[in-house]
Image (cartoon, rainbow, N blue to C red):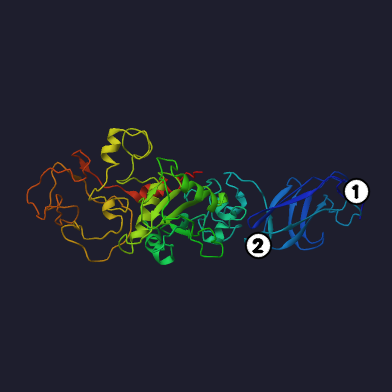
Amino acid sequence: MPENAPYWNPGTTVDATTRGPLVRIEWDATTGGDPAASYQINLTTYSGTVVALVPASVRSCDITGLAASTSYTIVVTARDAQQHWSGPLSGTKGNRTTTITTTSHGGSGSLWCHPTADTDGDGLPDALETDDGTYTSASDAGTDPANPDTDNDGISDGEEVLGRPGLNLIGMGARPTRKDLLIETDWISNATCSIQPTTTKLAPMVTAFADAPVTNPDGSTGINVIVDRGQGGLFTGGTQVPDPDGTLDGRFTGQNVGGSHFAATKAVHFDPIRKDIFHYSIAHSGNGWASTAEMRGDDTYVSGGCGNGNALGYPGHLMHEMGHNLGLSHAGTHEGLPGPSWLCDDPPQDSNCVSKTSINWKPNYVSVMNYMYMTGLDDSCRDNNYAPWTGPMWLDYSTGTRPTIDEAALDELTGICNGVDFDFDDDGIIDTTPYPHDFTADGVITPLADHDDWDHVDRLGLADFVGDD
């Protein structure tokens, strides 16, 4: 081998780090012999399996296609323009070698070493963001290299694909081109009641999000809800947490956790590596404090059952409180109204916001965010107090399609939809003449408009999720 082949002097290295299913390698330039024209990356030895041949201007790349939980020796050799190469050179000149053990994320794509350029700064190299909307693997992510969160769900493409150390989001079912909502839920139980969340209990809420009128970059509709309730495998977060009487002391105040007991419980049982990705919930027995949540935050405290109504009780409460986390109030949001840009439950509040958005019980706002429909919606258009509904019920946020009704002239014959009678004043009589009535009991006679909750969740809710300590 000609002695003018490119080579390294002592002190130069090749380094390797794991990034989910990827291994990033970085190496120093050759320092002796002819100028390097290219570098070759091999496995095991300089003549072993070829990973890639890259130009001399490149001195880092991300390797795909390696098996999970496997030890590899990675070797970098140098070639000059005459194809003289450093591999066979003796001593410390010949090549640069490092050993790395891959993570448990699993192999991803074909064996290759890809450029590390990352235009949108999401942690996923441009070369792997294939921008076709379809996630196949980390080397064919389908994501937009100019958008750090292609599916607008509040989790960056890089974290969805590569995860965090100890957090394999792809393995949990997350995808960077379909919206995901991740929740960890613990539970507390008293001596006579266990409200441990189960797949069956959660199913109505999971179905509601899956059926959401929200379009994803991969062409699908809906939102994928992933709940860690301690079911095993990668899902080891959810657990029963101790409490002497089955209820936690303290409540949330505004945007902050006001209950020190809740905060202390979360500090012990919620892994900080999940911050800004998972919402945290504690299901309780229903004794003492009712359900509550942070507005535009990550914490919910949810009544679990123990006599709180039908099978939609717990999932309805959870979906309601999760709506607060995602920015929905009891009548929609503050979008489009003058005043502060945040939501009505956030200070500061203005009178327009309070009178039109923070109110509750709007009959034409058919959403689990409305106390009228918190534990189930139906398609009867009826006042259940006047004409109880015995048909199927389900959970949903509103799509904003119901017409506005005016408390100054409530028409019980027109009702809230399809001309079905609605007993607004709950006197057991369907009046034939419109009349004024403060249906929402907020002290103001005003028009009541529906609100498109799902549009807000699609555009802002998931992406606007703000983690809290």
The answer to which of marks 2 and 1 sits earlier in the sequence is 1
Of residues 431 and 119, the one nearer the viewer is 431
Q: Residues within 10 Å of mark 2 (few under 14, many from 20)?
A: some
| Location of residue 200 (image quadrant) | bottom left
- Asked whether, in this view, residue 159 is left or right of residue 56, the answer is left
Going by the numbered disc 2, the residue's amino acid type is Ser
Disc number for residue 4: 1
- Asked whether, in this view, residue 232 is left or right of residue 386, the answer is right
Q: Image height check: is 119 above or below 186?
A: above
Pick the quarter of the image with the N terminus.
bottom right
How far across and down, in percent of the image, does residue 310 sit? 31, 63
Alpha carbon separation for disc pair 2 and 1:
34 Å
Q: What residue sits right under mark 2 in the picture? A: 110
Question: For the residue labelled by badge 2, is the local secondary structure a helix, a strand or a loop?
Answer: loop
Q: Image height check: is 205 above or below 78?
A: below
How far across and down, in percent of the image, does residue 386 sit? 15, 58
Residue drawn at (48%, 61%) of the image:
229
Tell me, yes or no, if residue 266 can be seen here: yes
Of residues 274 and 224, the one nearer the viewer is 274
Going by the numbered disc 1, the residue's amino acid type is Asn
How far across and down, in percent of the image, does residue 421 sit? 14, 56
